[in-house]
Image: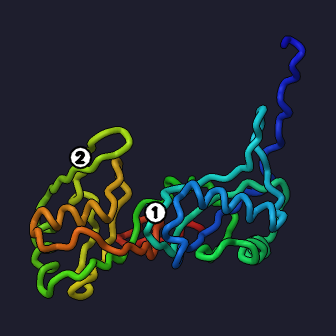
Amino acid sequence: MGNRQPPVQQAPPAQKLRLRYAKRGPGRFTSHRDFGRALERALRRAEIPMAYSSGFNPHPRISYANAAPTSAASEAEYVELGLKEVCDPAKITEALNAVMPTGFVVLDAADAVKESLGDLLQASDWIMKTAGAQPGVLAPAVEALMANDEFTVERMTKNGMRTFDVRSALVTLTVVDDETLALRSIHQTPLVRPDDVLTALRMLDERVPAQALLTRLAQGPLRDGEIGDPLR
């Protein structure tokens, strides 16, 4: 045992590249863990020159931030790759899209800026399509929720029951039509999810549907009330 050789120390990445990708169609039902496996397969198939971590079990340098929940579609998911050589972001995008599974599309790529993805992803825009809300139900519930300074809901998490202040996370919540809501929310701790907002609305009016089809349209830094591009 005393002769065991120390692990080889890997060189730091020559380039850190950030990708924006979409979850569409069947991709919305893929868990974050399953997507991670699919991405690693795609990186190997596309022969992307990945940098690896040091240690006895090296892993490709891949960092995720604020992934959308399973069953939600998204046009704004982000991941950072550490590469062992400098590559053209456009060519990485093209190579990955040639091998990515159905439901996932790389939309943009850029060299990492100095701020971490976690610090840049401060807010999200969502569309919430409820399952058959009655006409005239959503608007009064939204108005009542927005009139509060604080509105808490409870949700079971892997660490037990947690309380979430839904109102403090809301930047805007508007009614698009009788069945659809547009949500802009801050990524606070603990994270308020769109389904927490729906729970709050149901507490105000039980006629609000319990489920909604979720699509994230954007996420990034919040500047003067608007969501910016975290890649630029």
Q: Is 197 displayed left or right of 140 in the figure?
A: right
Q: Which of 85/132 is in front?
A: 132
Task: Give the quadrant of the N terminus.
Answer: top right
Residue 141 place in picture, x, y as percent: 12, 73
According to the picture, the residue beneath numbered tag 1 turns out to be 70
- Circles 1 and 2 in contact, beta carbons < 8 Å: no
Q: Nearer the viewer, mark 1 or mark 2?
A: 1
Q: Which of 91/2 is in front?
A: 2
Q: Which of 171/98 is in front?
A: 98
Residue 14 place in picture, x, y as percent: 81, 53
Which residue is found at the position 59% from the left and 71% from the top?
21
Which residue is found at the position 27% from the left and 60% from the top?
196
Task: Give the quadrant of the C terminus.
Answer: bottom right
Q: Quadrant of residue 126?
A: bottom left
Secondary structure of the residue carrying tag 1 is loop
Whether residue 207 is visible:
yes
The vertical placement of 1 against 115, above or below, is: above
